[in-house]
Amino acid sequence: MKISGNVFIVTGGGSGLGEATVRALTQQDATVVIVDRDVTNGQAVARETGGVFWKTDVADEANVKEMYAFASGLGKLRGLVNCAGIAPAEKVLGKSGIHALSSFMQTMQINVGGTFNLLRFAAEIMASQEPVETGERGIIINTASIAAFDGQIGQAAYAASKGAIVSMTLPLARELARFGIRVMTIAPGIMETPMLLAMPPEVQRALGDSVPFPPRMGKPDEFAGLVEYILGNAYLNGDVIRLDGAIRMPPK
């Protein structure tokens, strides 16, 4: 899938992994729609990269429809990269009581519902387009987490949401294959996202040291580089790639 001259949508594009992906794609002359709820960050990334910002709540159907109506006027939609999500930490039986149902459902609504909301409309648009030379019409790349496989104590909601993204990868790829649409998932490990970079330096060092090799946190640019590779390799489909330096998370 060629990047130059095509339209790509990146959710969570105002910061972290999404921002790095926006920068990588725009550097290759793609038209990128930056989807985020944070207007300040989203507009800043748009100004710096030449992308287009659209304030969007990924879990809101009407809001997402409006964004796609806009994006459809920019050219051929060839890629969706879902990076938007939340990462709460809450125990089922904690000091303040039992896990709130509202926080569990919010995590599922944003991480799973938001991802699915974006990809279903993207698939509809991609399926109606003419294929490129390889027979592809588009590609959807979702973001899970290593928590889907070795979630820690306090990550029941987060691990469940990311596990759902992992589990839907293959059935989506099988269903959309007849339309020439590939579906892949990246499961990042401990990455240099704004949330982790806000932690004390000693905590950041400890997290980095826990990675077998290289003994450091992953860089958003490395995530973006994997996105680029997936886009360019037409035989990658229906699978999940861990991007984690070989770490396997302990219980806590």
Image (spheres, rainbow, N blue to C red):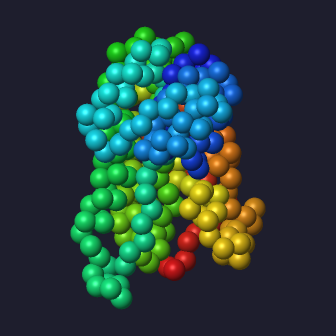
Give the side of residue 203 with respect to residue 111, left or right.
right
Image location (x, y in percent) of residue 192: 64, 58
Residue 21 placement (x, y as % from top left)? 60, 39
Q: Nearer the viewer, residue 204 or 158?
A: 204
Indicate the quadrant where residue 248 lies.
bottom right
Can you say whether 89 is above or below 244 in the image?
A: below
Instruction: Please name whichever residue, 115 or 197, is drawn nearer the observer in this view of the structure.
Output: 197
Q: Quadrant of residue 69?
A: top left
Left or right of 40? Residue 206 is right
Point out residue 66 in the picture as x, y percentages from the top left corner.
Answer: 32, 27
Which picture quadrant has residue 153?
A: bottom left
Task: Determine whether, in the image, residue 15 is placed left or right of residue 112.
Answer: right
Which residue lies at the image location 29% right of the left edge and 76% below the top edge? 99
Does any portion of residue 151 appear in the rendered image? yes
In this orientation, does residue 226 appear? no
Residue at image location 40% in from the left, 18% down from the top: 72
State which quarter of the image contains the N terminus. top right
Instruction: Count the numbered circles shown.
Output: 0
Relative depth, front residue between 218 and 200? 200
From the viewer's perspective, is residue 47 above or below residue 164?
A: above
Q: Residue furthest right?
A: 214
Q: Position of residue 34 (x, y in %)?
A: 50, 34
Residue at 58% of width from left, 32% of height from top? 46
Looking at the image, the residue that sits furthest to the front is 40
Instruction: Residue at 55% x, 44% y: name it.
Output: 41
